[in-house]
Amino acid sequence: MAIPLSYVARNLWTRRLTTALTAGGLALVVFVFATVLMLDAGLKRTLVGTGEHDNVIAIRKGAETEIQSGITRIQANVIETHPAIATGPDSRPLVSKETVVLISLRKIGAQKPSNIVIRGVSAAGLRLRPQVRLVAGRMFSPGAAEIVVGGAIARGFENTRIGDQLNFAQRDWTVVGTFDAGSSGFDSEIWGDVDQLMQAFRRTAFSSMVLRLADPDRLDGLRADFEADPRMTTELKRERTFYSDQSRALSTFINVLGLTLTTVFSIGAMLGAMITMYAAVANRVGEIGTLRALGFRRASVLAAFLAEALLLGLVGGVAGLAAAALMQFASFSTTNFQTFADLSFRFVLTPGIAAQTLAFAVVMGLVGGFLPAMRAARLEIVEALRAA
Amino acid sequence: MFLLKLILRNAFRHRLRTVLTLTGLAVAVLAYGMLQTVVHAWYAGAAAASATRLVTRSAISLAVWLPASYETRIRGVDGVKRVARSNWFGGIYQEPKNFFPQFAVSDNYLDLYPEFVLPEGERAAWMRDRKGALVGRQLADKFGFKVGDVLPIRGTIFPGTWEFVIRGIFDGADSSKVTNHMLFHFDYLNETLRKQKRRTDFAGVYIVSIDDIDNAAAIAVNIDAEFRNSLAETLTESEQAFQLGFVAMSDQIIAAIRIVSYVVILIILAVMANTMAMSARERTSEYATLKAIGFGPRFLALLIVGESLLICGLGGGLGMALTLPAAAFFKNVAGIFPIFSVSGTTLLSQAACALAVALAAAIVPAARAGRVRIVDGLRAIA
């Protein structure tokens, strides 16, 4: 027969201070664990959300980012006129020839400037990215020195309100609108007219091209065609793959650092749980003897103490998770090592992360409680009763 | 003496509990020390920067190049001693995870960096070979490079596979210098680009050495004034400010590591406070007995604080002692940070944290023991 759960819960309640301190230690570890997972999930969602499934990006072979890449006008024309490219309602090909340049901007309150992507897009560029919506002001007009800024830029950087002017490449550029890119990587970018920007930066070649395929399955055929064309030095990648590749280094870094830390920290918290549970056993030797004398089996005693450790872990887990959930209101911005540009992303709590976090807390409780519970179960009835 | 003996006996009364607490403390203090060292490692480049060097780059951003013609114009600015060119190559050796920086530099580059020591013969051999490259000692040790090795490197900014022949290995003048990079002739890059009919004669940044540190700010302003309103405006700053710019790019990551290093202290504070609270609670009747035979609350407080200090001192000391070998191990295994040494400040702050935890954990139990009424205390059950 099992020992009632209420006995277990009331034991924890009786030693409130100890329970709170132990659960507090567990909660802090759980908090770190959860925020690391949330950060990684946020990074992935941001960069995966940046790519559209049907879109293909063309960059120069060997280049890993758009900054390093270059596509000549001849190559751009070859790509643009290929029959595999979808056409828009105006029966022009759905292709955006883009130029990507990094400029230095100062974050609000920061001493040092950060690198920001400024992207020149063609008219079709917006149609190719349906997740980008204008939230304030208007779109830049082609042929004018006007720019629109992403949400993360407008919130985090100086001089990026509508009507402000940014000076770079020997010109003043007027901010005429703010767009929301649904928390994708474009949120950390500034957009303008490609021809204006290329002229200003004295560029003769585009950086990359984004194209929509008439039929998503024709990518391999398109690749083979360009492979056979001696003029072409370009490489085609699905936009999703391209952007998720760019998050790899940062994501690995966050994961390795975060998980090493949580492993080390969890040792401390598990030792805490173990100390608490050993004390709980030591203080209740008489009680345990009585329970055994009443007819409860060793297994029941073991189960009761394990349940107590598990409950302790769960309390810590829920507290840590609740604190981590609050982090969803914060955002994080750092330089992506691969693109060398600033990227802003949020902490994202998914049900999977919540489950993982709680499981982690419970496991910490169980590992910490196992040896003490074994000791409790091993006690001899007579000796235990005498000790009381 | 009696007090000390009592503290010692008390501390090791529950041997298992004390050992567990000690281990937890050691792990936490170790983790704190490692995290502080990681933060320091981030600043290693800036710490090693020289005050007599300025860096001139494009005002737009580092990714935009400057014309090669600027070199002579910068040299003409008053107070400038030498000008060298450095260009980020961004190549990949075998696979992306083998990342190390490569710079295409002008031949006089090493004259500006006296902290990199290269044997005269190797330098001459490098000068003779257009495809020659120099690698730092840390880099050579990491991959086992030797003089004479041929390095194939795949370019990302400059397409194609480039072959370099290692002609020399340079050492840092002291252990704080980062030598995990590779240098090669800018001319090799330039000539190859000319053959490919791509843009040539540019510089990523100019390194400028100056005669007088006090004039650094004025010289920087003068250089930038030289190119104001030109097609490529410049931004000149001290080498240290330039390096700190890179650190600032990951400032939120560094801030997160800092916060987390305090979280580990909080975790261990919870464990330690719990241990002390449990011990004090179990000994309530003992404290009452001590009071009954005439010891005052001050004595009880000393007893509890002393025990806490003893445990934290042992655990903290163990953690600190482990930090040095752990850092050496981490440096060899991970190899992310070229400079990864534990500083004196780190050790001091570890000690300070252990002390703070000891005191904070003892406050509540000591106050309680001091306040407990003899009658209640004698009646108390653990």
Image: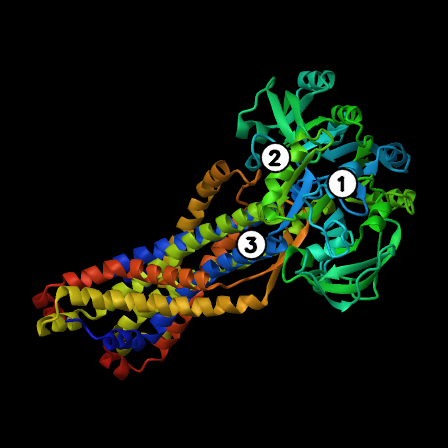
| Viewer-nearest residue: B118 or A194 | A194
Q: Residues within 10 Å of mark 2 (few under 14, many from 20)?
A: some
Residue A317: x, y in percent? 40, 66
The Cα–Cα distance between marks 1 and 2, rounded to whole angstroms, is 33 Å
The Cα–Cα distance between marks 3 and 2, rounded to whole angstroms, is 25 Å
Mark 2 = which residue? B100
Tell me which chain the residue with mark 2 is part of. B
Q: Residue at x 61, y 43 (%)?
A: A218
Residue type at tag 3? Lys
Q: Quadrant of residue B111?
A: top right
Q: In this view, does A358 lie to the left or right of B351?
A: left
SS label for mark 1: helix
SS label for mark 2: loop
The Cα–Cα distance between marks 1 and 3, rounded to whole angstroms, is 30 Å
Q: How crowded is mark 3: few (under 14 residues within 10 Å), some or many (20 or more)?
A: many
Q: Which residue is drawn at 24% across and 58% down?
A: A371
